[in-house]
Image (cartoon, rainbow, N blue to C red):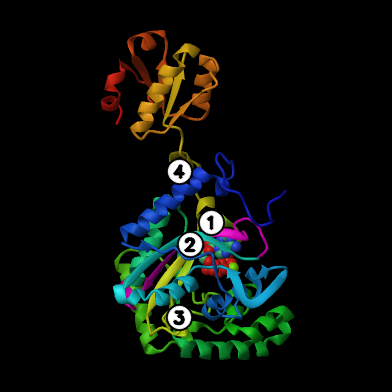
Amino acid sequence: MKLIKGFKDIYPLSDKVVENTSIFNSVKEIITEIAKRYNFQEIITPVIENKDTFTTGIGSDTDIVSKEMYDFYLFKEGKVDKSSIYSLRPEGTAAVIRSYIEQSMDKKRKINKLYYFGPMFRYERSQKGRYRQFNQMGIELIGSDNIYYEYEIISLAIDILENLEIKNFDLEINSIGNEQSLKKLSKEVIKFTEQNKSKINSDDLQIVKKNPLRFLDKAINKYNFKDVPRAEEFLDNNSKSRFKDLTDILDENKILYKINNQLVRGIDYYNDLVFEIKSSELGSQDTILAGGRYDNLVKKFNGSQTSCVGFAAGVERLLLLLSNQFIQKIEISTEFYVIYQNQSFQNYANEVTKMLRKLGKNVEMDQEYRSFTKQLKHANKIKSKKVVIIGEKEYKNKQILLKDMITGQEELFDIGKLSTKIT
Ligand code: ATP
Ligand code: MG
């Protein structure tokens, strides 16, 4: 039996940071904790949706929908049932908005602040930082177009990186304007590529034909063109002033950013603000997180006009950026190891173990009774923070010797004092 290519197991003690349960869970805890600090609440949607949630939401001409989705029919009683087509979710936003409308969340709160964490699926070439099943943490603020919310979610994104002690990242922002500006930009891209036809390869010309903006998103970097049409040229006054207001707020709050006027993003639903945070330490898959404003998606799903802004972060890319120092700090190790010197003390050792577990502690004990030195070696190997030693004297006097493996400090006390000695 073998894993499917592009998929991975996440398991204890893995040497690979993206496959290690303890590191994965600690990072999940840190980043969801930050979302909660900003008062976002978790939404959990299924990993499977009707395919049209994504074709309508993300756009059928996008890479994700046209090339990367795992779609399937149900197989019933030996027959393929073609009445419905399902997809494993390739991203979170479309499903969150589907749910927002279906569950009438607007009736409960005027502004809904939601976060999600979970697996996404995309059929693409697997390589470092790119998997066919990966995890995203996403933030969606639904129900306001206030620029201060744009500032707030950008701050949240930066807080996540800072709390993971990730350094050397760049925030890139741009405004792509509204639907009209995007239409004008698309037209200009078509005109531009026609004029430069001889220099553009046929695959990229196909991209332009299907979705001109995708050419700017994915293909443009290959060519050394000057005077490529830029979103900036087609912004109306409202979009211009929104972008100016945001950069003013970012300046005021000393948030460093670069304006990247080539940034358009490969998903149909964005308008005005788009942003990405990148790290050169990731190699070619350098985007850690990406997002923007999407004021038309709710309407597209037959809801009422609702402004939204959000982002999604690639959890594996965050994991790949963690320093060894930070990993050491967050990797969970055994709290207590109860060591007993003689097999006849095993019942007493189990009594102590049980008491510690009742106090909520994580405790390891060797039930196979290997020698005292072997138990101690094992406690060291699994990096136990504290060791409880039960020797002849401790056993007789109903005491324990508690040793802190980090400071080396030892303390001998009666078992009855356990709960007061352990905090
Ligand atoms: P890319 O340009 O890397 O393909 P994207 O534009 O397809 O990214 P988004 O849809 O914006 O990515 O997803 C947000 C984040 O999710 C990305 O910035 C990245 O960190 C992560 N991500 C996307 N696809 C993958 C994947 N196949 N494997 C791991 N992480 C991914
Ligand atoms: Mg992609």
Is 108 situated left or right of 5 in this image? left
CA neighbours of label 3 inside 10 A, class few (<14), some (14 to 19), many (20+): many
Asked if the stretch drawn in magenta spans residue 22, the answer is: no
Is residue 152 visible in the rendered image? The answer is yes
Foreground residue, 129 or 345? 345
CA neighbours of label 1 inside 10 A, class few (<14), some (14 to 19), many (20+): many
Alpha-carbon span between mark 3 and mark 4: 39 Å
Is 299 situated left or right of 282 in this image? left
Callout 1 touching callout 2 (CB < 8 Å)? yes
The amino acid on which the numbered mark 1 sits, given as a three-letter code, is: Arg
Q: Which residue is mark 2?
A: 313
Percent position of residue 120, x then y: 55, 63
- Dot 4 or dot 2, earlier in sequence: 2
The amino acid on which the numbered mark 4 sits, given as a three-letter code, is: Phe
- What stretch of residues is rendered in magenta? 124-148
> Which mark, residue 297?
3
Alpha-carbon span between mark 1 and mark 2: 8 Å
Residue drawn at 57 percent across, 91 percent down: 187
Q: Which residue is mark 4?
A: 326
Q: Nearer the viewer, mark 3 or mark 4?
A: 3
* SS under mark 3: helix
Callout 3 touching callout 2 (CB < 8 Å)? no
Q: Nearer the viewer, mark 3 or mark 2?
A: 3
- Cβ of mark 2 under 8 Å from ligand 1: the answer is yes
- Dot 3 or dot 2, earlier in sequence: 3
Percent position of residue 19, x then y: 57, 47
Alpha-carbon span between mark 3 and mark 1: 27 Å
Is residue 274 visible in the rendered image? The answer is no
